[in-house]
């Protein structure tokens, strides 16, 4: 997608603070971190929301979680714990319509979320 912020990060048109990358996934630091560690794992392929996923995306979704595990270890939050969140549409607070898995750690998390 030409008019998508996160696609522009994948293409390199917009600079991202990348912490992990493989052929399917890019992980970069959130510009407005909500925890000492706050990164976003995105598929390089554009999908707008969870509602747009199909069975063909099964491997890609798995790759996002494997990347989360790698990055949590790399950034030192794997043992203490971290939270993964993917918001879907307006009421959940989705603001960027290219799916992304938030990975948050480095502080205690509360439940239920706000
Ligand atoms: P959402 O609200 O859609 O679940 O999450 C979007 C996330 O993208 C937010 O946490 C927001 O801070 C982050 N974000 C928005 N614009 C940019 C940007 O230009 N660069 C980076 N690195 N993160 C961004
Ligand atoms: Zn996109």
Image (tube, helix red, strand yellow):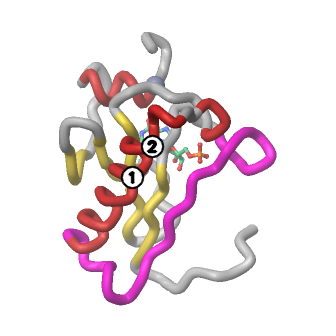
Q: Is residue 40 left or right of residue 108?
A: left
Q: Are marks 1 and 2 in contact (CB under 8 Å)?
A: yes
Instruction: Identify the residue position indicated by label 2 in the image.
Output: 58
Q: Is residue 76 magenta?
A: yes
Task: Between residue 79 and residue 66, name the one nearer to us.
Answer: 66
Quarter location, residue 76: bottom left
Task: Between residue 91 and residue 14, name the one nearer to us.
Answer: 91
Q: Position of residue 75 (x, y in %)?
A: 24, 71
Element class at badge 2? helix
Q: Residue furthest front?
A: 55
Instruction: Identify the residue position indicated by label 1 in the image.
Output: 62
Q: Is residue 62 left or right of residue 73?
A: right
Quarter location, residue 45: top left
Part of the protein shown in magenta? 74-94
The structure residue drawn at horizontal position 20% and vertical position 45%, both measured from the top left corner, is 21
Q: Is 74 rendered above or below residue 48?
A: below
> Could you say which disc has been placed on residue 80 in the image?
none
Q: Position of residue 81 (x, y in %)?
A: 42, 83
Q: Residues within 10 Å of mark 2 (few under 14, many from 20)?
A: few
The structure residue drawn at horizontal position 24% and vertical position 24%, both measured from the top left corner, is 12
Label the magenta part by its dominant secondary structure. Answer: loop
The structure residue drawn at horizontal position 80% and vertical position 46%, both measured from the top left corner, is 91
């Amino acid at each position: 997608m030409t008019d998508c912020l996160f696609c522009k990060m994948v293409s390199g048109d917009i600079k991202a603070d990348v912490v992990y990358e493989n052929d399917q996934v890019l992980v970069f630091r959130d510009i407005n971190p909500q925890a000492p560690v706050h990164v976003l794992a995105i598929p390089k392929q554009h999908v707008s929301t969870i509602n747009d996923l199909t069975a063909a995306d099964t491997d890609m979704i798995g790759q996002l979680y494997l990347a989360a595990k790698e990055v949590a270890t790399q950034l030192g939050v794997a043992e203490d714990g971290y939270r993964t969140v993917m918001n879907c549409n307006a009421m959940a607070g989705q603001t960027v319509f290219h799916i992304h898995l938030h990975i948050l750690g480095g502080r205690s998390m509360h439940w239920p979320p706000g």
